[in-house]
């Protein structure tokens, strides 16, 4: 089994990741509330976020981004900014973002009906807080400022989002699993080499009928709490990823022990498969994929 078919555990460890091109065509499944930056935002909305900073250089970018091909121009300008200039600008960027975050707090405070997460005021609150953290954690990296140009997506537990290879993505908070996505499926955002505005749309996952015998549908992910009593998985090719603790996956080829972040690929001919141990596992049935035997891949 190749690494391109491997599931990946997404865990925010307190330091938000920088926006980088996504390397594979994958589906991101939220295990908890999961926050991501995914693809370039509509230029008009990014211009408003830049204007919130109330700085001459931000106003200049806000004006440029609204011109023809302005998104590409601004993205290229941000990426090509010298490291020394970024380091000098980082404290000012942090101060400006914290002030804009406070203004966004005032805009949403006291509302009888809270805005939905995708509302511009709610997004501004999250984005300005995030960019202030990125500027402090990564002052010499243009990704901190580039975050102002990207969609901030919030997935509830059980929601998923398909992301195409090359899309600029940052995982900023929460826990999730990234699994191989079917080729030709809906894309969450455009590729990084072609910065065009996109609108990622999460999809709700179907849930299993019970923890003892989970129903693992095509392109579905189920999170299971595993105890010493064996949990029997349905037959068929599937990926088992250890999210927490340690478990043993057993089939006709013998047992495979998994610790946090490690996974096993179960083949069509594996026969009855059981999971035993203490922890949580994510079980995913990849679409149109068959594996000849249980194969272990470390984190």
Image: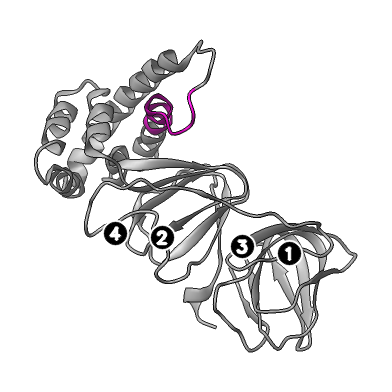
How far is disc 3 from disc 1 in space, using C-alphas? 9 Å
x and y percent of residue 63 in the render? 12, 31
Q: Give the range drawn in magenta.
A: 115-129
Label 2: state its secondary structure: loop
Magenta stretch containing residue 232, yes or no?
A: no
Which numbered disc covers residue 220? 3
Q: Are marks 2 and 1 in contact (CB under 8 Å)?
A: no
| Distance from Cα at disc 4 to Cα at disc 2 | 13 Å
- Is residue 198 visible in the rendered image? The answer is yes
Write the residue at 33% across / 28% down: 94
Q: Is mark 3 on a helix, strand or loop?
A: loop
Residue 38: x and y, percent? Answer: 38, 49
> Mark 2 near mark 3, Cβ–Cβ under 8 Å?
no
Q: Name the residue under label 1.
A: 215
Tell me: residue 23, above or below residue 59.
Answer: below
Tags 4 and 3 touching, CB below 8 Å? no
Q: Position of 259 compared to 17: left or right?
A: right
Relative to 262, 44 lies left or right? left
- Residue 141 visible, this orientation: no
């Amino acid at each position: 089994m190749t690494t391109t078919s491997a599931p990946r555990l997404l865990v925010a460890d307190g330091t938000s990741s920088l926006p980088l091109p996504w390397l594979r065509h994958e589906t991101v499944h939220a295990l908890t509330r999961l926050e991501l930056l995914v693809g370039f935002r509509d230029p008009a909305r990014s211009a408003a976020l830049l204007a919130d900073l109330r700085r001459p250089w931000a106003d200049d970018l806000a004006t440029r981004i609204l011109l023809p091909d302005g998104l590409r121009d601004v993205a290229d300008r941000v990426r090509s900014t010298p490291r020394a200039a970024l380091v000098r600008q980082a404290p000012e960027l942090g101060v400006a973002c914290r002030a804009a975050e406070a203004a966004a707090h005032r805009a949403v405070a006291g509302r009888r009906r809270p805005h939905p997460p995708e509302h511009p005021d709610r997004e501004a609150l999250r984005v300005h807080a995030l960019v202030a953290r990125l500027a402090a954690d990564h002052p010499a990296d243009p990704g901190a400022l580039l975050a102002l140009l990207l969609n901030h997506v919030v997935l509830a537990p059980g929601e998923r989002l398909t992301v195409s290879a090359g899309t600029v993505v940052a995982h900023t908070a929460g826990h999730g699993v990234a699994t191989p996505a079917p080729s030709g499926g809906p894309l969450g955002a455009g590729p990084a080499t072609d910065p065009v505005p996109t609108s990622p749309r999460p999809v709700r996952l179907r849930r299993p009928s019970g923890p003892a015998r989970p129903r693992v549908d095509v392109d579905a992910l189920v999170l299971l709490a595993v105890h010493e009593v064996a949990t029997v998985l349905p037959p068929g090719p599937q990926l088992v990823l250890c999210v927490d603790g340690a478990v043993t996956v057993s089939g006709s080829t013998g047992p495979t022990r998994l610790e946090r972040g490690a996974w096993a690929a179960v083949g069509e001919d594996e026969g009855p498969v059981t999971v035993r141990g203490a922890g949580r596992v994510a079980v995913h049935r990849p679409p149109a994929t068959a594996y000849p035997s249980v194969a272990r891949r470390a984190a």
